[in-house]
């Protein structure tokens, strides 16, 4: 099982910094998910690790050995691209067998293994079809099966489930993780789907404009984002601009616009310092009557969206700020209407505090 170490990897295409001084480690047998917007450098990173492209600077290390000058085919890694890259003149079964047979595995053994993996991706009944006879989602599953059958110990998966329908994607991501663990693969899996990354990644990594923003367990990244961008990119978060008024052993008092005051547990910022308060939407409660709580702010419902298991309300606070809150759709409470007077509350322990960004909040939230 390969352990991967990347040290200060940078890659430029003309004036574009696709990767900018990226450093991280992947442990033996780990399943690492990489999240980022289009153009964040996710695919470039996979292609650099695989050896398809070379970095302008930095070191790529497999099991303690630098592999910058090792050809892609000699790295014992398989890259499964978004574009499938199937052989159109070969049947599905032959596409999947291609790697093992080219390495000297006998045809019977290779086909048996291929059928086992095609069954996993629900395509065993299409083994005799040609790629052109399959839908895009089916072709993506063939590409994934070919990667799994390759015999490589390192799998580099670029949106491997992206073209699948929602239900099949849910089923396959669980089975993909189980297979990787059972077979001892090390996997680096690029996805734009936050739920996918959170559910199957041992750790997740966030990229933005070619820079690594944070890497850690899903639990840690979600509950303890290291910057405003990560807090916004993972999950749904409210952001409020404020000034630290004072702090005690119990927490800090923050003044929002309109002379609205809230309390937070964080005491790391000094008085008069500008900060951003971040509260997850699911930790923000909404009531249609006065309540006794740590932090209460009044406002009016400006939007209401039924989301299936919950209703998402957007509220214009009396101080002019906007905040969103979730209420279970089966809570038994009457649905709030646009214009209803409400109270927003949240516990001070649920707020994360960040330094006010130099270029402003809006710029800090942008992915590009």
Image: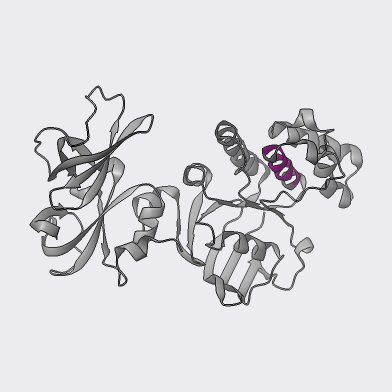
Which of these two is toward me, 264 or 366? Answer: 366
Figure quadrant of residue 137: top right
Q: Is residue 225 left or right of residue 55?
A: left
Residue at horizontal 37 percent and vertical 60 percent from the top: 365
Give the magenta range.
137-146
Residue 270 in the image, given as x and y percentages of width and height: 16, 69
Residue 130 in the image, given as x and y percentages of width and height: 83, 38
Residue at horizontal 85 percent and vertical 41 percent from the top: 94
Which of these two is toward me, 282 or 224? Answer: 282
Image quarter of the N terminus = bottom right
Name the main secondary structure of what is drawn in magenta.
helix
Q: Is residue 270 left or right of residue 357?
A: left
Residue 145 in the image, given as x and y percentages of width and height: 73, 41
Q: Is residue 284 magenta?
A: no
Figure quadrant of residue 9: bottom right
Q: Is residue 171 visible?
A: yes
């Amino acid at each position: 099982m390969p352990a991967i170490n990347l040290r200060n990897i940078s890659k430029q295409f003309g004036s574009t910094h696709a990767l900018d001084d990226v450093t991280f480690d992947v442990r033996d047998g780990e399943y690492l998910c990489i999240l980022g917007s289009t153009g964040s450098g996710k695919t470039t990173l996979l292609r650099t690790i695989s050896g398809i492209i070379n970095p302008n600077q930095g070191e790529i290390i497999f099991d303690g050995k630098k592999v910058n000058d090792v050809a892609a085919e000699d790295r014992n890694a398989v890259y499964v691209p978004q574009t499938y890259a199937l052989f159109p003149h070969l049947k599905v079964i032959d596409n999947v067998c291609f790697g093992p047979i080219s390495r000297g595995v006998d045809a019977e053994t290779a086909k048996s293994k291929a059928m086992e993996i095609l069954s996993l991706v629900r395509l065993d009944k299409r083994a005799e079809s040609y790629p052109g006879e399959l839908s895009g989602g089916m072709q993506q599953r063939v590409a994934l099966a070919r990667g799994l059958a390759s015999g490589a110990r390192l799998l580099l998966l670029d949106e491997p489930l992206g073209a699948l329908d929602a239900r099949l994607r849910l089923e396959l991501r669980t089975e993909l993780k189980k297979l990787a663990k059972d077979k001892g693969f090390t996997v680096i899996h690029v996805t734009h789907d936050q739920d996918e990354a959170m559910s199957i990644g041992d750790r997740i990594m966030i990229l933005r404009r070619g820079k690594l923003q944070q890497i850690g367990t899903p639990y840690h990244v979600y509950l303890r984002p290291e910057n405003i961008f990560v807090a916004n990119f993972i999950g749904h978060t409210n952001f409020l601009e404020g000034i630290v008024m004072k702090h005690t052993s119990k927490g800090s008092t923050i003044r929002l616009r309109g002379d609205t005051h809230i309390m937070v547990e964080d005491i790391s910022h000094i008085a008069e310092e500008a900060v951003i308060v971040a509260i997850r939407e699911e930790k923000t409660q909404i009531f249609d009557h006065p309540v006794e709580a740590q932090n209460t702010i009044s406002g009016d419902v400006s939007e209401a969206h039924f989301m299936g298991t919950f209703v998402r309300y957007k509220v214009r606070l009396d101080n002019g700020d906007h905040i969103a809150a979730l209420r279970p759709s089966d809570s038994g409470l009457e649905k709030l209407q646009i214009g209803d007077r409400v109270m927003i509350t949240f516990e001070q322990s649920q707020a994360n505090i960040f330094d006010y960004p130099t270029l402003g909040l809006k710029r800090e939230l942008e992915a590009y």
